[in-house]
Image: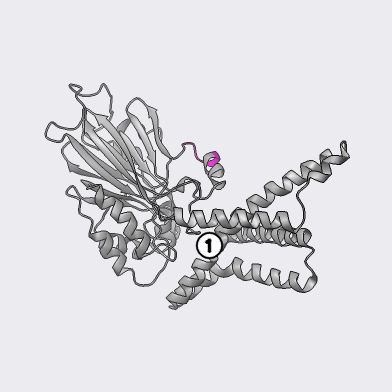
Amino acid sequence: MRFLTVVFLIWGAMHLYAWARVRAYTGLGPPWAVVLAAALVVLMVAPIAGMSLSRAGRVLPGRLLSVVGMVWAGAFFLFFCVSLAHDAYNGLLSAAGLLIPAAKSARLVGAWPLAADVILVASATVSALFAAWHVTPHHIQMKTPELPSDLPRVRIVQISDVHLGATVGKGRLSRILEVARAAKPDLFISTGDLVDAERGDMTDLAEMLASIQAPLGKYATTGNHEYYAGLDQSLAFTRKSGFTMLSNELARVRPGLTLAGFDDETARFYRGERKQWDEAAIVSQATKGDYVVVLKHRPFVLPQSRPFWDLQLSGHTHGGQIFPFTLVVLAFYEYPPGLVGLEADKFLFTSRGAGTWGPPMRFVSSPEVTVVDIVRSAEQGRRGRTRPGPG
């Protein structure tokens, strides 16, 4: 609750800044300033109000209000960033004006520069709304001598961060599954945040996911939003969609290939249970000589477990989803989105995700479905790798 309070206060302060800026640039009088303030307050609380209506059983009006509020949130974030850049530019010229008075005349102030900001943000918002629908496959190939001779290639299709809920429904899920189905997966994987929040009956969405066929199986792990949405109903939905949940355990899908799936870190504190597990001890039990793929929602790599696996598939970060928030993500997480080589024959792939959280927008961070081809290399014998422990 304290965290949400802090977030809401920051969000309110951002809106207050925008309100004051519009007044300063346009000379808006008191009556219209009050109208603007009221409109900003309504839009600011719309997502919370929409969620409350949905939980009260009024799903359709709740969803509509949530969508309006979330689109506003994305557009406002862009407007806030453009405003900061604009005001920083004017501030620098004002400071330069102390030495060179003529510099002040180059400042962009008044209603027309503000209108230009709004047009720029509106254009970016429309582009970002369309970009969220443009889901594309991201192909990577991993070569290994560890697959047996009767298994020249395994294709894993990974979806992550779909966030089915108020703003991601049948339309976008259909596009995501279209890309996944076209890839013809041997294994179909969800690395968390398949669901976002309560949305009423999602049987239709579960049936859509269940239609994807994968001969070696369908496996999923939890993300943080499975816990936020309610773990029991999230797990029930995921299983109804045809996935086998991997909760801190191994699954040897066939000789030569093992999956290791781990709960999101939220599980350690969910419902006060303080669930604990030893990732290294679990993954060390994988059959020696198998190609081991770790499924973990967050792109955190534990040094003590790294000797026991080959590839980790993660998500969570959305690649920032809306630039310039991308820069915050790059600063916070050790590894950028995409494929990263950690050392010889050890790789982490962090997906930008297939859906969206909050604003149904993508700006300079397109959504993706990952297609991983694990290919048996021509190299003879096993890699010169030491994998201590059982197996």
**Residue 95: which quarter of the image?**
top right
Q: Where is residue 121 in the image (x, y as percent from the top left)?
A: 60, 55
Judging by the rendered image, the residue that carries numbered circle 1 is 71
Q: How many labels does the image show?
A: 1
Q: Residues within 10 Å of mark 1 (few under 14, many from 20)?
A: many
Q: Where is residue 303 in the image (x, y as percent from the top left)?
A: 40, 32
Is 332 in the magenta? yes
Name the residue rendered at 67%, 61% in the picture: 15
Question: Where 99 falls versus 380 (above or below)?
Answer: below
Which is nearer the eye, 56 or 68? 68
Q: In this view, does 66 lie to the left or right of 22?
A: left
- Taking the view exactly as shown, the residue that stands out farthest to the left is 150
Image quadrant in which the N terminus is located: bottom right
Q: In this view, does 247 lie to the left or right of 129?
A: left
Name the residue rendered at 31%, 65% in the picture: 205
**Residue 112: which quarter of the image?**
bottom right
